[in-house]
Image (tube, coloured by chain):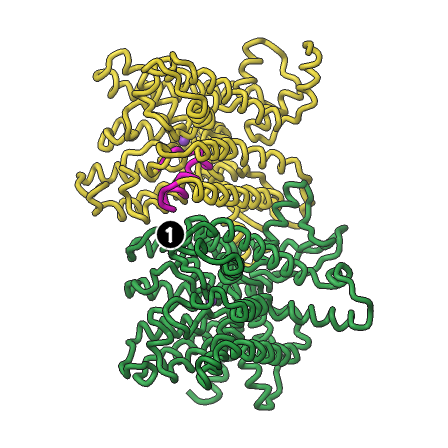
Chain colours: A green, B yellow
Amino acid sequence: MNEKGISKFRIDLKPTQILVLGFLFLIIVGAILLNLPIATNDGNSIGFIDALFTSTSAVCVTGLVVVNTLEYWSMFGKIVIIILIQIGGLGFMTFATTFFIIMGRKIRLKERLIIQEALNQYSLSGMVRLTKNVLLGTLLIEGIGAVLLSIRFVPKDGAYGIFKAIFHSISAFCNAGFDIVGDSSLSPFIGDIIINITIMLLIILGGLGFTVWIDILRVLKQKFENKWNLKSTFRKFTLHTKIVLVLTFSLIVIGFVFFFILETTNPDTLGNLSMKNKILGSLFQAVTPRTAGFNTMPLADMTHGSKFMTIILMFIGGSPAGTAGGVKTVTMGVIILTVISGIRGKERTEAFERTIPEDIIKRALAVITIGITVVITVTMILSVTETGSFMDILFESVSAFATVGLTLGLTGSLTTIGKIVICITMFIGRLGPLTMAVALSMRARSKASMKKPDEKVMVG
Amino acid sequence: MNEKGISKFRIDLKPTQILVLGFLFLIIVGAILLNLPIATNDGNSIGFIDALFTSTSAVCVTGLVVVNTLEYWSMFGKIVIIILIQIGGLGFMTFATTFFIIMGRKIRLKERLIIQEALNQYSLSGMVRLTKNVLLGTLLIEGIGAVLLSIRFVPKDGAYGIFKAIFHSISAFCNAGFDIVGDSSLSPFIGDIIINITIMLLIILGGLGFTVWIDILRVLKQKFENKWNLKSTFRKFTLHTKIVLVLTFSLIVIGFVFFFILETTNPDTLGNLSMKNKILGSLFQAVTPRTAGFNTMPLADMTHGSKFMTIILMFIGGSPAGTAGGVKTVTMGVIILTVISGIRGKERTEAFERTIPEDIIKRALAVITIGITVVITVTMILSVTETGSFMDILFESVSAFATVGLTLGLTGSLTTIGKIVICITMFIGRLGPLTMAVALSMRARSKASMKKPDEKVMVG
Ligand SMILES: [K+]
Ligand SMILES: [K+]
């Protein structure tokens, strides 16, 4: 195996395969590091299965944990976890590009293609620029988030509070859901406005996707010169941005109203709280399933209805090309629009005066069908291997697939088979819809004739 | 309101509206009859909500019951129920046609259109002939079924055994799931080969759909002269028949293997039975969720995995234009084929050397999306109004939507709101996918260019 042989091997791999192998490599490196005795507080190795589980959960920005992150892991362990989250959240390939840029190496077409796949982008041009912008934007937002969180953490913990603020800022922005607060996620902060608002904004921004940020910035830059007007500003957005913004907003509102109504009289969750905290708690519970994984309410004590709503929100997830998981808002949007167009007797799927191309619809269908199939299969396997109610098992399966990280308590009692199944599910959940979308985006599109102009949206 | 006024009123209604109103009228007539004191054994009226529930369950061939059919209803009540099942199973419009034929009235185009909608057919020609054949076929099969069931029932119950045989033959063929055996469906017959085989064949034949029978008869007639050969016979079938047969067979085999493996060691279900009875029990449990509603195993004692598999089989249901409910085998088949074609990079959905038209794919997508939406909504409402585990509630919702009639025990304890919700769900489940398919089949199809020849299949 000389340099040339390795190089040849690389060239023969398809970009999607490189992406999959990259994530796999990162997970294994993470598992090896977390398996070291210095990674834990008691100085004993956690054992490979649990190290693998934690590494997968971090790289796939899921947040399901078999041990209490605060108490179990040493400072070294915590730093490994947050680095895995940051790399996993931004995507292996964005990082590889950054590496190439830093090394001053010229980006070849082949590598550009890989980055394109990693970001699920549809134009080759400006890829490097995009990657730079994404990195800068990420650091900027995470930085602001960390400063805001410091207001709460530094007075209490001093210098360690800064680490805590950075950790939670990264974890929230990457929709990772890991926390170093205690054993009940962010529950101690259910009524804390600064923590709630900061974390929610980080989650939402991370979940919107890079392309949406860039589109919003583009429109804002144009608008800077002209008079401000919400309606005409919205009209300037790409179809993708419009669908993402409408669905993100709608899902948060629906979730908020739903959780508020169902939990406001539940003494185990919001029943005994003040109105302010009820509103804050419901809002947070509406934001976190998509797909942050923090919680301020005790999830296992929620009503059946709220648990089921959480499952649905988790499955939908965030938006494409961001840090969120799930089948994605746009995917769901395309399916809903297609069904509505069908019922109205329209031959094409239309949204905001645009037609959504047929191949995008089929891609959306594929992503959702495969998503449902994965969830059903995993639920079926866990039904056999694990003890726990059906709700607990379904919740855990969807949480892993959509890389959410919320649990009704099953994670702690998983069997070894269960842990391996959840690991694979998190991996499929993080890479599956993405690579699906990539593989399917290579398809030839049917020719358009006599219809409104096409505009692409991303799904999956 | 003179004769002319009523006639004008009729003409202004769309065919689908007539279908919906027809079913509604039948349900209300049934509810009024079942509300009479003579309908019950104790001579007291059951009360309107429960009469309405039973009538809806019978007309929509569901089989969910709030009272024990055998013990609660008088002979009059039982006859009303079985007539409602027969009319509901064959479809209101088939019956209307028959009525017209019997009255010697000429069938006008308008009425032909209604029958076409009721049967979800795609050709106007031969509609009357079809209806006649469907009725004759139904009577023939139900007659043979009743004779076979009499072998078991008559020695035990004498003349009443004949009624019992007819009742269960109709109930099985119409996929209705009502029984007059006792309070645990067909559990007493778990090891009875005659009952099991007869009921299973009736369920499967009823669930295949009229068009498949007619296609099979057509091919068999052609084949009568030539040499018999399974492969070349299969090739002569329409695409619709091929998909129905392959999926029906596959789902039964998958279900059988699944239930056998999961329940063979479960002491509460198959654990203590002989190998013959284990096989018979598993096979019956694979057939009944699609969408017969009888059971020989105690459902509530099954493992989580088996309950979940039952939910999936119930949701898929039987085949179009038959007595079965659910989203239908072909609908699921079209979606799976589309996803597979997409993954393989094919631009069109192909099956058995044919292309499935785009509008059929969208119709399938609409039926399944609406189906999932209904199930989610109903589950959500029942989660709030009923007490019971999430599994019980989800199972009940899918059972009502797919007009299956299996229950884990929730039906008996439903609140009034719960009963009304289940009534509406059964009604939507019976008419929704059908009328959806009808409404969408009116859509213009996009022009085909440079592809394999189109062939229609029915979905929903
Ligand atoms: K997460
Ligand atoms: K039924």
Q: Is residue B225 visible?
A: no
Residue B118 at x, y = what percent?
56, 27
What is the magenta range? B387-407
Q: Residues within 10 Å of mark 1 (few under 14, many from 20)?
A: some
Check the image and report above or below for B458 versus A97.
Answer: above
Does residue A59 appear left or right of residue A335 in this picture? left
Q: Amino acid at mark 1?
A: Met
Residue at the disc numbered 1: A391
Check the image and report above or below for B165 versus A424.
Answer: above
Does residue B294 appear left or right of residue A233 in this picture? left
Q: Is residue A354 visible?
A: yes
Q: Secondary structure at mark 1?
A: helix
Closer-to-camera residue (B423/A282): A282
Q: Which quadrant does ligand 2 occupy? A: top left
**Residue B405 in magenta?**
yes
Closer-to-camera residue (A258/A88): A258
Residue A171 at x, y = what percent?
48, 73
Q: Quadrant of the C terminus of chain A?
A: bottom right
Q: Residue at x 39, y 34 (%)?
A: B414
Residue B152 at x, y = what percent?
24, 21
Query: Mark 1 CB in 8 Å range of ligand 1?
Result: no
Check the image and report above or below for B59 versus A411.
Answer: above
Check the image and report above or below for A58 versus B236.
Answer: below
Residue B177 at x, y = what percent?
37, 29
